[in-house]
Image: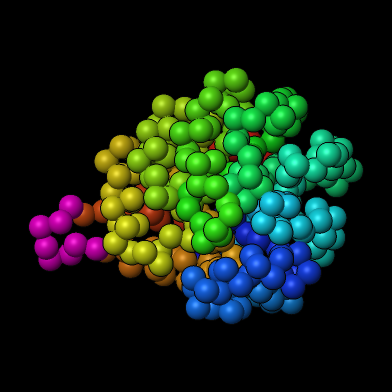
Amino acid sequence: MNIPCDIHVHIWAASEHLSDSFRNELVQVSGRPDSLNVPLDRFAETFACVRKVVIFGGRAKHVGIACPNEFIHRFAQQHPGKCVPFAAIDPADADFMRDFEQCVGDWNFRGVKLLPMYANFDPRDRRLDPLYAACEKRGLPILYHMGTTFCRWAPLRYTEPMLLEEVSERFPDLRMVIAHLGHPWEHQTAVLIRKNPNIFADISALFYRPWQLYNSLMLMQEYGVTRKLFFGTDYPITTPLESVEKLRRIMGFGEGSNFPRLDPSWMEAVFERDSLKMIGIGS
């Protein structure tokens, strides 16, 4: 299989860049003590089936996520032509615009990753206007973690997809990607990406709840927005091949019943989609 892009890949050294409390909370919910460990030495093998991989760490002091963007830069240099680095930004950092400028100006990062609930900020916060303006001017997309979390102190009020509508009104040419379909507020994602030409969504890390995902994908199909969906894994939570297998299985739900049927052809189109080109940073 030859997938053009995985738009959602975490790269970090979990024991160094993630707080004990953050990692422990995930273990309590998932029962998987190794969920956040990134086997960096197996990256090339894991992503052999993917041409381009969007990678980022994470910056969110509020819950203890502190992966330096320099770590991502060094990793990307080890995989030239494969990795597309995005800068992780936390507006709580006093010099976050200086960090952004270094990532983009010196290291050629191609986008930004924001974690509103983990970093405890409203995406509409005016502190972010310089970042939004810079990304809009330079044609750099922003990938937002939107949707639920296992983390107790990450406010869900900052993670509903509809919050991005105001951002899009102030910065109409800014390209934005809603991660994880914004679950469990997928209905907000569907109506938002339908009306706004510069907002998209990825389908990463959702197949663990197959019934919910079936309904979410049916919603996207019925609203006619499947053309705006991107493939992503949320690695290391899952891998490209596992994601493709599980998503194909969900597309077969309802066979032999009176349930509405998903059309498998559009999911194959998601797998084959050049998402980087659609958000303006394709080669």
Is residue 168 at least partly visible in the picture?
yes
Left or right: 213 in relation to 38? left
> Does the segment drawn in magenta span residue 256?
yes
Residue 258 coordinates in the image, percent (x, y): 10, 57
Residue found 43% across the figure and 60% down from its top: 206
Residue 7 coordinates in the image, percent (x, y): 59, 52
Q: Nearer the viewer, residue 249 or 36?
A: 36
Is residue 104 at least partly visible in the picture?
no
Q: Nearer the viewer, residue 212 or 273?
A: 212
Residue found 75% across the figure and 27% down from its top: 130
The quarter of the displayed image where residue 268 is located: bottom left
Residue 101 coordinates in the image, percent (x, y): 84, 37
Residue found 33% across the figure and 51% down from its top: 217
Q: Nearer the viewer, residue 39 or 146?
A: 146
> With respect to residue 204, does 164 lie above or below?
above
Left or right: 228 in relation to 92? left
Residue found 41% across the figure and 27% down from its top: 195
Instruction: Tell me the magenta residue range.
Output: 253-260
How many tags in the picture?
A: 0
Q: Nearer the viewer, residue 224 or 151?
A: 151
Residue 179 coordinates in the image, percent (x, y): 52, 48
